[in-house]
Each structure stands twice: as C-alpha cells, then as structure tokens.
Amino acid sequence: MTNFTPVSAAIGGLLIGLSAVLLMLFTGRIAGISGIFGGLIKPQTSDRGWRMAFIVGLIAAPSIAAVGGYPVPMPQVPGSYITIIVGGFLVGFGARLGTGCTSGHGICGIARLSPRSIAATSVFTVAAIVVVALSRHVFGG
Amino acid sequence: MPIFASFVCGLVFGCGLTVSSMIQPAKVLGFLDVFGIRSGAWDPSLAVVMAAGLAVASIGYALVRRRSPLFEKESLWPTKKDIDQSLLFGALLFGVGWGLVGLCPGPAVANLATLSLPVIIFVIAMALGMLAHDLWPARAAVRAADNLKILKCPPSNTSITPAAQ
C-alpha cells in the first residue's frame, strides 16, 4: 500500500459529504454529478441555472487550488483514445440508465440507506474491479 | 441565491475531489486494483474517501431531512424503491466504463479545469452516452413516469418527504 493517503482522503471525503448535505439544505437537490450534468445537457430542461452553477463551482475548485499553489497534476488518463471514448460513453449511458453514479448512488444514496443505491454501488464497484483486474493482470495493462 | 448556493456546493465538492486526489484516475484505479494487493499496488484511499463522505452525508441528511430547503420551495428526495433491471444493467455498464478509464462524472468534469485533451474527449463521449440514453424514446417514457412521482409531492413550506420512505 505504497500510495495510501488516509488523511487527505478523509478530509476530501468530508468535503464531498459536506457538499451533498449543503446542496440538500440549500436547494433540496441530490448531489449526483451524473444527474446534475445529465440534466444540464438534456435538450428540454427547465432548471439549468443551479446545475450550471454547481458545475462551474466543480471546475473552479481545482483551478483555484492550482492558482493557490496546491498541487493539481495533469490527470493521467490510461488507454488509447478508443478506450477513453468507449469508457466515457459507457459511464454516461450507464449512469443515466442506472439513475446515478459514484456520487449519486455511492454517497447520497447510501447515506439515505437506499437499497437501490446499495445495489447499484455494489454492482458498479465489482464491475470496475473486474475490468481493472483483467486489464492489469490478465491482458497485461 | 439558489444559484450562488449551488456554486458554493460545487466548489466544496471539487475541493474534496482535489484534496483527496480522487480527481486523479490513477488514485481511483489504485483502489480498484484489488488484485494488486500482492505487489503493494493496492491503494485503499478511495474507501476512506467514501467512508468519510458517508459519515458526513448520512448524519447531515438525517438532520436536514425534515426541513424544507433554504432557497427552494421543495426538496426532491428520490422515491423509486424497486431494484429493477435498468438499475442493475446501468450500474454494470457504468462500472465497466469506470474501470476502463478510472474517471466518473465528478472527476471528469472537474478535470476540465486542466484542459487535458483525453479528459475533454472523455467528457464529450460521456455526454453523448447520456444523451443517447435520455433521447431514446422508450427510456424517455419511463423517466417521464418517474418524474411524475416526484412532482406529486405537494409544495408547501414544511418538509417534503413521501410517506413511503
């Protein structure tokens, strides 16, 4: 476990949880990014305002952090462009079909003790673990 | 005011992703690489992020549940209860995509700040995937029916939680 960073992970997790609680307290909405983003880009949406504001804040955070001197390295995105496109499409389609993602189901849903979210989170976590196992240890990443 | 409040929430969320390094696909893949435990490659950090996030969110949600939101008329608590095929199949597809790249919607969108080309391509592909689902007529009908269930909550100044929660 050479890369384990429990302290920053805990602090970051607290902030993510806090953001979800604040969004519910302030606007009565679930902080599920697939839902917020998906609803933003959908042709017929009536509430783009708060969605756009949340997304802007989300993108602003690492920008401000970087300007403030906090290390924000360029993300190392693995795989060929084909993998990235297929992965992205599956993440988008799957999140909408499954009504949520890691934030919507994994944090917000489980925090509400939603059986749907517990099921979804279990399924997508196992699926992801299997894919990583195959790509790193079977097919030799 | 709800606009500014949402912006602040997005900012806090983005800070959480940045501080925890969950904005880095390598960190996420490090957790998903459970079979890398033998070589010391396994990184449980994501589990700590989730645990901390859940601790705050579960307590916080329990506290705010009974009240109406500060800057909106009513809160939208999801009402679907059944674990259906769409949920499971959607989660499966999502998990496969997530395992392939180590990016999910939050970190992907936050990473647009870096102007990384692979991230931009991922986000475009993700957006297309979302639209492919949302504009699919059969799925749109199902979603419309679900939305009607949420909107049936009567608007009032007291908290909205459907009795069946």
Image (cartoon, coloured by chain):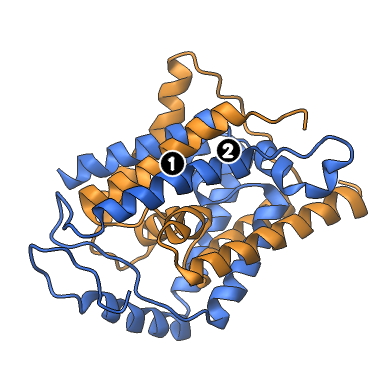
Chain colours: A orange, B blue
On whether disc 1 and disc 2 are found on a single subunit, the reply is: no
| Amino acid identity at mark 1 | Ile
Q: Residues within 10 Å of mark 1 (few under 14, many from 20)?
A: many
> Quick one: SS at disc 2?
loop
* Residue A93 visible to an observer of this rendering: no
Task: Name the residue carrying label 2.
Answer: B22
Residue furthest out toward the top: A69
Tag count in the figure? 2
Q: Quadrant of residue B22?
A: top right
Q: Nearer the viewer, mark 1 or mark 2?
A: 1
Q: Is residue B25 above or below residue B97?
A: above
Q: Is residue A56 above or below residue A115?
A: above
* Residue A25 visible to an observer of this rendering: yes
Q: Residue at x 61, y 75 (%)?
A: B89
Q: Quadrant of residue A77?
A: top right
Where residue B135 is drawn, which disc sits there? none
Q: Residue at x 49, y 71 (%)?
A: A115
Where residue A16 is drawn, which disc sits there? 1
Q: Is residue B27 above or below residue A70?
A: below
Q: Residue at x 27, y 81 (%)?
A: B148
Of all chains, the one bearing label 2 is: B
Q: Position of residue A91 (x, y in %)?
A: 59, 59
> Quick one: SS at disc 1?
helix
| Amino acid identity at mark 2 | Met
**Dots 1, 2 in contact, CB < 8 A:** no
Q: Residue at x 23, y 64 (%)?
A: A46
Q: Is residue A18 left or right of residue A117?
A: left
Of all chains, the one bearing label 1 is: A
> Is A20 or A69 nearer to us in this picture?
A20
Residue furthest out toward the left: B157
Disc 1/disc 2 C-alpha distance (Å): 11 Å
Q: Position of residue B61 (x, y in %)?
A: 32, 53
